[in-house]
Image (spheres, grey):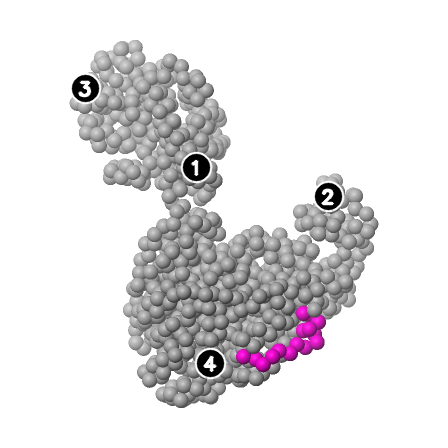
Amino acid sequence: MRAAAAVRRWLAASVLAGARWGRGLCGERWGAGAAAARKITENAKKALASLKRENPRLEPTLAIIQAHNDNLIQEVNKKFAEEVGLRIIHICLPEGSSKDEVVNEILRLNEDPNVQGLALDLPESAYSSKVLNAVKPEKDVDGLSDVNLGRLVRGDGYDCLVSPTACAVMEVLENLDGKKVLLVGASGALGASLQCMLQQRGVMTMSCQWKSPQLQDKLHHADVVVVGSTKPEDIPASWIKPGTVIVNCSRDFQSEKHRCGQQNNHPVENDVCSLAIAMRMQNMVKNTERWIQSQQYRKWDLHCLKLQPLSPVPSDIEISRAQSPKAVDVLAKEIGLLTDEIEIYGQTKGKVRLSLLERLKDQPDGKYVLVAGITPTPLGEGKSTVTIGLVQALSAHLNINSFACLRQPSQGPTFGVKGGAAGGGYAQVIPMEEFNLHLTGDIHAITAANNLLAAAVDARILHENTQSDKALYNRLVPVVNGVRGFSDIQLARLRRLGINKTDPSTLTEEESSKFVRLDIDPSTITWQRVVDTNDRFLRKITIGQANTEKGFVRQAQFDIAVASEIMAILALTTGLADMKERLGRMVVANDKKGQPVTAEDLGVTGALAVLMKDAIKPTLMQTLEGTPVFVHAGPFANIAHGNSSVLADKIALKLVGEKGFVVTEAGFGADIGMEKFFNIKCRASGLVPNVVVLVATVRALKMHGGGPNVTAGAPLKKEYTEENLQLVADGCCNLRKQIQITQLFGVPVVVALNVFKTDSPAEVNLVCETAKRSGAFDAVPCNHWSAGGRGAVKLAQAVEKAASQKNSFKYLYNLELPIVEKIRIIAQKVYGAQDIELSPAAQSQVDRYSQQGFGNLPICMAKTHLSLSHQPERKGVPTGFILPISDVRASIGAGFIYPLVGTMSTMPGLPTRPCFYDIDLDPTTEQVKGLF
C-alpha cells in the first residue's frame, strides 16, 4: 500500500511538472507523448468551448471516486480539467472502503443528472467486474465496463468510450508496420482494449503474464513491449533484445526500481500517463456532446401490444388481466424519456419528473384534443373509453405519436355506484385495478395536506383563545440553543404586515400582537376536512367536544378528497414554485375585520408543499395496446373544474412531437367540463386546443328525447334496447346544443358516437347526419369498446383532418367583468337560462370577494351534470328557467370563484347496493375481483 501511494505521488508530481503549458511551463522534458497530450487537450478545449457557445448553461461535470489518502492525483486531474474547461468533483472514500461502499457511491452518481462522466481511482484490488460494471456505460469515461469493451470488440468505436490509457499507448506507437507487439502483464479491461485496438490495426499481437514459461522467448521476438503491470525482480532486462521499444503503462511505471530495460539501450516511452489523462478529458468532452444529444427530443420507438378481441366481450377486469403490459421503464424509453426522468412505482407505473419540461422547452408542441360529451345518463357515456380508443387508433393503427391524459379516479365512485374510470372493454388503461385503487398515492397526499391545514386552523383558534400575546409569541418564536429567531415563513408574514424587522427582540408590543394573532372568525371558516370515501354522515359534524379543547365547539363537515382545493391546485399548477405559491394563497377563513386568512398566514405552506412534492409528478401508465397514458389529478367536474393536470398535458405535448396528438378528457357534458376546460384550464396553461371530440350515445339521446329514467344498477327499459328513431330524433336537441356550446369557443368539433350492440344502423346514421347538419366537422360511429383501437380508426382520421382546420379559439367572457355578470354569461349562453337569481348569502359573498380583490378570477360553476339546467330531471334542452345561485365560494389558490347552483353536495353518499358488494380479493393469487 505504501509503495502504491509513493507511485501515485510520483505520478502526480511528474505529470504536474509538464501539465502546465497553459502557464508557459512546457519544459524540454516533454516527448512525443507530451506533445500529443498538449494537442489533444487544446482540441478538447476548443470543442467544449463550441458546445458551451451553443448551450450557455452547460456545465459538464466529471466525478472521480477515490479510495486512498493521496490527494496529488486529484490535482493532476483538476489541472487538466481546468485547462479544458470541465468541472471536476472528487468523492474521497476512506482508504480500505469495501467494494459495496464503492458500488453504492457509483450508483448514486449514476443517477445524478448533473454528472456527465464518472471515473475511478481505486487500489488495484478494488477493480473487480462488479465495481467496473456498476458504472453506467454512458458515463464510463475510462471505458472499463463490459458494455464499452463489447462495443469496441464489435468495431462500434463511435458508440463506445475507449480506455484513455489504451488510446495513449496507441498514440505513442506510431509506425507498427511489420512489428510484433507483446503485451506483458496487461490483463482486464486495459489488456482487452489494447489487444483489440492493435488487432484492428493489423498488428501481430502477443500477450502473456510475467510468470508465463514462454515469456523469455516472446520478449526476445518482440519489437514493441507494452508493460501493463509491475515487472517482478527476477525478470532480467537482458531478456529483451536491443532496440525494443518499451511502453510502460503500469501504475508504477516510473518508480526507480522498475525501469524495465532503461539501462540496456531500450527506448522507453514514459509520457503515457499525461497523455492518458488528456485523453480522459477528451472522452469527457465526447461524452458531453453525447449527453447534449441525449437531451434533445427523441423519435419514438413504440412497440404496441397486440389485441385479440373476443366476442362476446369479457368483463373489463378479465380483459385487463389477459393483456401483459410492458414494463414501465421500457415504455418510458420507447417514448423518449431519459432514465433519470422516470421514478418507477412497481412494474407498470412511474412518476415523470418535471425536469423534462426544461429539457424539451424548445420542442414544438403536438396537437391538443379535448374529449367532452353530451349531457350524460347516470351511467356515463364513455368519454374515457373514447379517449383511450382514440389514442390506441392513432398510435397502434395509424403510427402517429399520441398520449392520453386522464384524471385519477376517486375511490368514492369506485366503491359507490359508478365504478372505476380506466375506460372499458378493449379501450382501457392497464392494469385497471392499479389505475382505480391508490395509483401512486396522489389523492392520499392531497388528503394529508388538506387535513393538516384544517387541523392548523382549529388549533390556531384554540391557542389564541387560551393564551396571552406574550405566551403566544414565546411559543411561536421559541428560544433554540439560547437564540430566538424567526423562520422564513414568519419573516414573510412580518413583511406582509409591514414590519421590516428580523430580530425578534425588537418588535414592539403592538407589532408582536399583530404578528401572533390571526383573529380568525370561526363562522367564516370555509376550509373543510376531506376523506376519499362516499360518507353521507360526514356532511355535517360537530368538532371539539373533548374536554381538552376547552369548550371550542363548532359545526363543520367533510368533503370528498377530490373536492379539496389542493386537488384543483394540483390540476392547474405549472410547477413546484407555482404550486407552493398557490398553496400559500389558499383562503381558509376571514378574520374578525373581514380580511382573508391564508395558509401562508398559518405558516403551513412549506409543509403542504413537502407533502405534495411527489404528487405534482404525473403518473405514466399504458393502454391495452401499449400506448402511453398520463394519469394525474382528479377534480370532479360538477363540484370542481373537472380536468386532468396542466402539467401532464404540457409534458405530453412535448413528448409526442410536432405531428403527434395529446388527447385529454373533460368531465361530464360539454356544458360542465368543457366550459371549465376552456375558461379555467386553458387560461392557467396558455394552451389552445385544436379539436373537440364530443361523445354521444344513442342511449343518452333517447333519454333526452323523452325516454324513461335511466337508473344505475337497474336494467334498461325496452325503449333503450329496441330501435326507436323518434326518441333519437327528439333527443338530438341536446346534441345540437352541445355542438353550439363548443362553437362558442371557436374550436372544430368532431362527434364520436359510442356505439352499443343494441343500436340499430338507422339510429347510428340518424345521429351522425344530424350532428353534421348541426355544424360538426364530422361525426363518426366508434366500436373501440369491442374492437380496441381498430374500432376508432375512422374517428382518429377525422380528428387528424379537423386538427388541420383554422382555429379561432376565444374565451367566453372577459375576466375584468363583475362576478355576477360572468355567472350570467355562463348561465345564459351555455346553459340556456333566462337569467340568474342570487340568494342574499351568495350576493354577500360576491360583494366580499369583490372588496377583497378577487373579482377578476374565472368562474367554476358547481352544478348538476344530469341536466343543462339546475334540475336533474329536466332533460333535452330546457329553456326559460331562472338559475338559482345559493352560495358563492372562492378557491383563491386554485384561482377561481365557484358559485353553487341549487343544492350541491360536496360529499356523495353510498347507495343501497354499492359496488363494494362485488369487490373481493383472492387470498391465494392476490388478484382483485369485481372492479369495473
Query: Label 3: few (<14), some or many (≥20) within 10 Å?
Result: some
Q: Quadrant of residue 451?
A: bottom right
Residue positioned 23% across, 23% down in the render:
182
Q: Is residue 613 above or below residue 271?
A: below
Q: CA distance from mark 4 to mark 2?
A: 62 Å
Residue receiving disc 4: 734
Residue 556, numbered label: none
Residue receiving disc 3: 221
User: What amino acid is found at the position of numbered circle 2 in the picture?
Assistant: Thr
Q: Secondary structure at mark 2?
A: loop
Q: Is residue 180 above or below residue 625?
A: above
Q: CA distance from mark 1 to mark 3?
A: 52 Å
Quadrant of the drawing holding the N terminus: top left
Q: Earlier in the sequence, mark 1 or mark 3?
A: 1
- Tell us which disc is closer to us: 3 or 2: 2
Residue positioned 20% across, 27% down in the render:
203
Residue receiving disc 2: 502
Q: Earlier in the sequence, mark 4 or mark 2?
A: 2
Residue 837 falls within the magenta-colored stretch: yes
Q: Earlier in the sequence, mark 1 or mark 4?
A: 1
Residue 354, position as x, y percentages in the image: 48, 52
User: What amino acid is found at the position of numbered circle 1 in the picture?
Assistant: Arg
User: What amino acid is found at the position of numbered circle 3 in the picture?
Assistant: His
